[in-house]
Amino acid sequence: MPPRKSHLRVVSNNDRFEVPSITCHICDTSIDSTAPFFDVKLKITSGVNKALDGSKTSDQLEEDIDSLIDELSKRDKKSLEEEVCLERNFQVCPTCRKRILSMLNSE
Ligand SMILES: [Zn+2]
């Protein structure tokens, strides 16, 4: 009987552990395994201001809700979910971290 092949590789103390390289999500620069990188967590959730403005009658509100339900039912489920709450995690290089921060601070 031939020896069973294992999918697992035994790592001896002499083997070097290779850290997978990371690429900056924004500028595509490869980030060296010894260089710093930054995890960016982005979360965008929707908010609605006008739906419940006390000036509408209950009939108007009902109409608004009906048309909203109608509009939502035509939309792709995935894009709809992302419009309500979109979450992304990605890694960026130090330069792009600075770019993001300056963009946020410039408003
Ligand atoms: Zn970058």
Image (tube, helix red, strand yellow):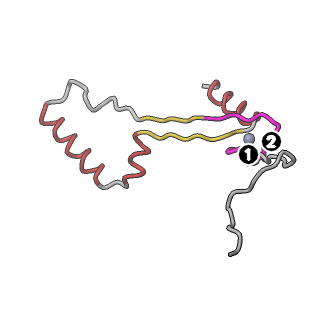
Horizontally, is 84 left or right of 94 in the view? left
Distance in Å between CA atoms under marks 1 and 2: 7 Å
Quadrant the C terminus occupies? top right
Report the residue at 71% width, 69% height from top.
3
Figure check: 25 above or below 52:
below
Report the residue at 74% width, 38% height from top.
93
Report the residue at 25% width, 26% height from top.
53
Q: Residues within 10 Å of mark 1 (few under 14, many from 20)?
A: some
Rendered location of residue 67, percent (x, y): 23, 46
Figure check: 97 above or below 105:
below
Residue type marked 2: Ser
The range drawn in magenta is 22-40
Residue, disc 1 = 22
Q: Main secondary structure of the magenta part?
A: loop
Rendered location of residue 105, percent (x, y): 64, 24
Observer-nearest of 106 and 4: 4
Figure check: 102 above or below 88:
above
Report the residue at 80% width, 41% height from top.
33
Residue 28 counted in the magenta span? yes
